[in-house]
Image: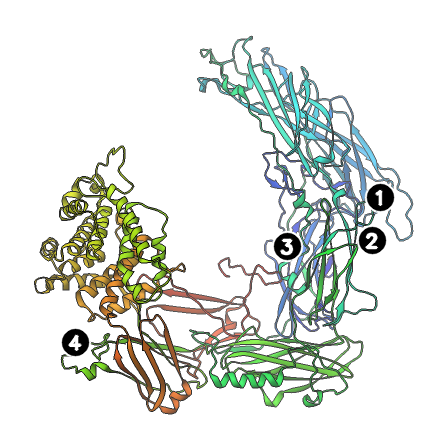
Amino acid sequence: EADAPCVIAKVSAQYFSGGGLSDAKVLWTVGASKSSYTPPGEHSFTFGKQSRWFWESWDWSPSPFGGLNAYSSDDEPPNVLAENSETFEGKTDTDGVAEVAVSWAGLGLGDGANCSPVMLVATAQVRDMNNQAQNAKTSFLVHPCRYYVGFSLPKTHGEVGKAFCADIVVVDPDGNRKGEKTIEVWFEGTALMTMEDDLGLQVTKTIYTFDKKTATLPKTSDAKDGQRVSEGGVGRIAFEPTMPGNYTMKFRVCDEFGGWHQSESASIWISGPGGATKKNAINYNMLSLYTPPVEKVTVIPDRQLYTPGDVMDIMVRSPLSPAYGIVYVSCHGLKVPPIPFEIKEGKDSATIQINIEEAWIPNVTVGAIISSTKQWDAATGGAPPAKDDIRPAYARGDVGVKIKYDRYNLDVKITPKAEEEEFSPGKEIHPSVVVKDFSGNPVPDTEVCLVMVDEAVLSLTGYKHIPDPITDMYPSRQASVGTSFGRSLLGLLPRPSPPPPPAIPTPPPVSFCAAPVSFCAAPAGMAMRSAAMSEAKCLVMERAEMMDRDFLEDEECADCFAEEEGAMDEGKNRSASLDANELGLDSDAKIVVRKNFSPLAIFAPFGKTDSNGTVSFDVTLPDNLTRYRMFALATTDLLYGITSTDVAVSLPLMVRPSPPRFLNFGDEFAFSVVLQNQTDKPLVALVACRATNGQVDEKKKAAKVTLSALQRGLVSFGVSAMKAGKMRLQVVSSSKGVADAAEVSVPVFTPATSEAFATYGSIDVDGQDSDMATEPNPKATEDSKKMQLVVQPIKAPTDVWPQFGGLEVTTSTTQLQHLTDAIIHLYGYAYECSEQLASRVLGVLSVRDVLSAFQSRRLPPKPVLEKKMSKWLSVLYKRQHRNGGFWTWGVPKYHGFQRYPDPYTSVHVACCLAVCEEKKFPIDAGVKKKALDYVRNIEARIKEYGYARYWGPKTRNAIIAYALYVEFRWTGDAATKATKFMSKHGGGSKLPNLTPEAAGWTMMAMSKQPKLTKKYIDQLKASILPHMTEEADTAYFTTNYGDDGQTVMLHSNRRTDAILLEALVTVDGTKNVLSPKLCKGILKHKKKTGGWGSTQENCFVLMGLTRYFHVYERHVPDFTISLWYGNLFGGKQVWKGRSTESKEVLVQMRGIQALGDNNFLIHKEGKGRLYYRLGMTYAPKSLVCAAANYGFKVERKYEGVDKAEHVVMKDGVWHAKLGERIRITVTMTTPAKRYHVALVDFMPAGFEALNPALKGTPKTDDAQTQ
């Protein structure tokens, strides 16, 4: 409506260094909610509904003083009036200002339907020329009346028969007091009275009472010129309560147009004779022994905040009368004597005075404990005891009291610079800090910390100031006095249940009528004053799958980058000037390149004031054009203070480049530069751009821009990223003696569509690639054994970028790198159960000779190792049971249900002894005999073990298979028993009750008789394949024992890999292609500490790798290799002796393209095993690549958040409207269980991630969107 009242919401968009954003797009969002208001200068009065301001020890809501606070249950949360907010679009004017008119018609304000103010909230999103957006919010308070009525209560409690007073004031919204106004006041509440009913019984009745008065306020004092009326006009009204209870006071004022405002007090406690408090209901019939309950005492201070030296009046309201009690002050670390008091017969409260001490700052807890005898009350229910039957009763309660700590505050002031200094980029300033105490005296020798931070960075997080240290140095203290009542140990036996008491008639309640306070919600009518937003252009985002993003440069790129960087490198010294004539700019202007954009100008953690309380600092301003916030924090041993001020840094002509955060190789983008004229005259500015590691469009390297006074303009330069690495962009502008220049750097990642493929293999002494060969070459001559050759056909990629990628060749002579850490882990293991001791011996013995071959110096000397192992074995000997098994933690004194040791631990210790004998390490003959007998009769040992009844068949079979393996290691052959064991499972490739571990142990037990057991070994190999996951260079197994996995078998997948590695190498030698992959997979799963997860994993991994070493790497390397790609020689490598080193060679993509399709040759001469990896990396020129599936299926979808039609797919390319918010959804599926999977989805260059935790970021309604 044209005549509807409205308020104008205005948004002003400016740079931190100054200057408005003209003609910028604005999106408005407007809503309304219920609020409150206190006129200026009237904070000593309460306007609106008063909340309870004191807290009790059981109320756990935070207070402004860092302690606890509580609010009454009837505090109302904000009432949202407009459920659906309204949105509008517009633009800023030439000063960067936009407005919207908001009407509050229909909210019930001004017509008597609503007595509370309403908060109208307007949010504006402003989008700059370079498409950067920021949000701002403001609020408007719409008053329900032309006047506000406020009140102040001298006390929060009173007594019956004594006047209870309230001071009243009427103020307009501007804070001018209005005298001679008529106020309506209600004094209403409820009283609990103890009295006799018609039957002579003591009962408690609730009585509602109210009183209403009208008061006219006195005149105010005369107003002075330009000042508001702030004196006089305060009236006092008094009520004389006649009954004790809880009351409230309501105050109402009306204006000439029918609007009204009402204020209401929190609970007022009135004490007096005949009063009662609410009792704890006790049902005697439900108790066989009655324990008196702890009842609640209400402790009420007379003020909200105290100063040391004040006298505090504490009212204690008790549910017991008569009663005796004490009031105590609980202040952590201080002893305060308790104060005794008495509540006389017929009264329900007492008032105690306490002197506030300085040592109590910032708060104390005041509590009361009351003891009494209490007559049975009819309200408790149950059968009444005899008249002389009384019970002990007691009650407690406490309250928090806050005390000012102003005397511990320091007054700190900052002078940002000297008079002759200026705030310009790179200039030096000398801020000073003055420190005074509470009385205004200088404080010498004060430690001062100065921090100067970019306001633009602080605004992102809403950071306002450094937290005041005084709240941490003087924190709110909890109550340190505990209460313990011995009366809970007493009880009263109930009497036999008498007949129920006669019904007590309920007296009619006193009626009370009060005018309801309504709050009418209606949608606000809103009008728009700005023009509609025009359609933005579409931005084509041409990016498909992104797989790799390393900072890789070939040699030519690096050399070229170094040359261009040297030509541009005025940058290491910011005072260097650009050649204006070279760029076609104003030669009179001195152009200084701004490079140092650090958000932190200074962090000076320590400075000390002189005798005048002053300290100064030296600050060199960074090159940001922004506003800085300067904080100063001052402290002595007991005093603390903090302050802040703002400093703006600007130039007459400012250049604001807006590059993307990153680029991909091959990207083309519009480099936006905003030019800002801070002078009061128009300027014709020349602007130019140049780049290293990037190419600027030759047609537009420079431009001329006309800038109006105090206005800005946008210039875009076409730039393409043709090399990986770091792109540096310089932009410079000058006009009539003023100039500015800035340099920014942008990382350029490798092509988003890069692809990589690799093949792996090894060459042994037979002249064959062991990953390809199935049988040894019987015709291999001695010369062929000395000369081996690998021929790998290479197809040169076509239509790819020659600057990126190539053929990577990696060679090494061993798979067993860095095993020393695993041995050190076992050797120094801190715990000594039987399993752990056996694992330590197994690991050290298994790999000792392997590490000696690599001349490891980190292991202890051999005599020390042997002495340590003998000590471990002696501990195991003492734990052997008579049946040959081994207790886990020594022989138990009381066996209980379990009379026999654990079978798995026993077999594992037996395996340790078998390896000792195999490695010719001496062991006790008697222990050996009993342990071997235990292994040979393992099925009987499992049956006698009590807990075995709960095991599944997989667990039983695995332990039997492990025992067969141990017998094989001890005697050299267990094929016959293993064959019988296999026959029980029926054969076939599916063995559901044999885990891969059990299959591996059984295969090794059969390995000495291949002709007899070949059928079963093939079945076992087939049974483990479904549990295997094979990748290009690694393989691993996944298995599960169910609940028995950890409790019985100590199972892990890495242990399974190690057992099967040992089994495959034992059965197949070097013929199985899975063995090198399993070995590499095990090594890749090493932890950062150098070993594997547990002692079980470490010992079995070391056993498996030792077997691999003795079969695959039995020959000491002594050979040379030559590398060729076609006729291009790639170098010669010499390998002599064992080493864990690996070597790499790169054939660049341009060389591969020059030679075309060809063979890559690895020519080896000499004895030993060579491991190699050939990997090809390249980037197709086409940015649209077909989808691929190599074990994972990944799907990605882009969606427009604001409008779905703004983000569409056309011809395989996503098209997005500039400025549209985009939701990215990534879905990954895998057909098998995978471990340690990281899914990374890179954003296209030019996208900006929206962090909802940052201020000014547009919010989204989708809670799952990050």
Query: Which secondary structure lies at badge 4?
Result: loop
Q: Earlier in the sequence, mark 3 or mark 1?
A: 1
Q: Residues within 10 Å of mark 4 (few under 14, many from 20)?
A: few
What is the C-alpha distance between the residues marked 1 and 4?
A: 111 Å
Q: Is residue 312 visible?
A: yes
What is the C-alpha distance between the residues marked 3 and 2?
A: 60 Å
Q: Is residue 1052 visible?
A: no
Q: Earlier in the sequence, mark 2 or mark 4?
A: 2
Is residue 883 found left or right of 419 in the rendered image? left
Q: Earlier in the sequence, mark 3 or mark 2?
A: 3
Looking at the rendering, which quadrant does residue 1196 occupy?
bottom left
What is the C-alpha distance between the residues marked 2 and 4?
A: 94 Å
Amino acid type at image mark 3: Pro
Query: Which secondary structure lies at badge 3?
Result: loop
- Residue topped by disc 4: 776
Q: Earlier in the sequence, mark 4 or mark 3?
A: 3
Amino acid type at image mark 2: Asn
- Residue topped by disc 3: 523
Q: Nearer the viewer, residue 945 or 765?
A: 765
- Residue at horizontal 53 percent and vertical 59 percent from the top: 1261
Which x, y percent locates residue 1109?
26, 66
Amino acid type at image mark 4: Pro
Q: Residues within 10 Å of mark 3 (few under 14, many from 20)?
A: some
Of badges 3 and 1, the one in the foreground is 1
Which x, y percent locates residue 1220?
55, 70
Q: Nearer the viewer, residue 393 or 1090?
A: 1090
- Residue topped by disc 1: 178
Query: Which secondary structure lies at badge 2?
Result: loop
